[in-house]
Amino acid sequence: MSYLAVHWSRFHTAVLSAVGILTFALLPAVVAASEGGGVTVVPDWSVSIQIINFVFLIFVLNLLLFRPIRKILQERREKIKGMESAIDNAGKTIQEKNTAFEKAVRDARAKGLKEKETLVKQAEEEERRQIESINSKALAELEEIRRKIRGDAERARDALQPQIGAFAREITQKILGRTV
């Protein structure tokens, strides 16, 4: 609707309201006059002036009071709607940031777990290599010690071989208790 149509509609409504109010105000006087008693009010030109005064006051009040109040109320409605949309947008933004943060945390945890698993596997592999190295060194040292013991046993046997006869006589003498 155009500006003029809206105001004409309001003006028309105001005029009809004024006529209706005056009709209901004058109805009891007209009824009383028709019955022959009471106060008789005869509408004259002053009623028309009052109607024009009423319409003029409605127009002036609309212009000076009601229109600025409606304008302020409309501005407040728009401001509130703007604030509500800003709040909604902020809520959506916060929710999106929350979701992004939670996703980043999940991704970081997954990446950390993968790195941890990789490090654990590397550590286990390094531990296995060190154990194998230590075992091979220990086996080599054990083999070296066995070889030395065999060598020492051979030398001891070779050194004791010529004395076997003398040891055997001594043992026999001790067992028999006499010289052989």
Image (cartoon, grey):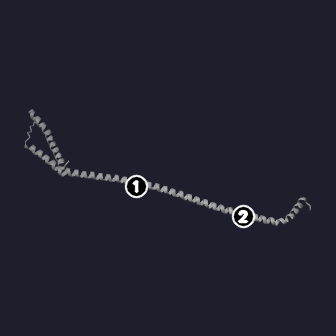
Near-viewer residue (165 or 96): 165
Q: Can you say whether 17 is above or below 80 in the image?
A: above
Taking 14 as reference, is 125 left or right?
right
Quadrant of the image occupied by residue 45: top left
Q: Can you say whether 94 is above or below 18 in the image?
A: below
Q: Which mark is residue 40?
A: none
Taking the spot 27% from the left edge, 52% from the top edge, the residue there is 78
Amino acid type at circle 1 is Lys
Work out how far the residue at label 1 is from the one at label 2, CA to CA, in angstroms.
70 Å
Name the residue that disc number 2 marks. 145
Exactly how many numbered labels are in the figure? 2
Taking 150 as reference, is 119 left or right?
left
Quadrant of the image occupied by residue 102: bottom left
Near-viewer residue (62 or 41): 62
Relative image position of residue 12 (x, y in whole percent): 15, 44
Q: Can you say whether 42 is above or below 2 in the image?
A: above
Taking 1 as reference, is 37 left or right?
left
Amino acid type at circle 2 is Ile
- SS for dot 2: helix
Relative image position of residue 146 (x, y in whole percent): 73, 62
Taking the spot 15% from the left edge, 49% from the top edge, the residue there is 59
Earlier in the chain: of badge 1 and badge 2, it is 1
Name the residue that disc number 1 marks. 97
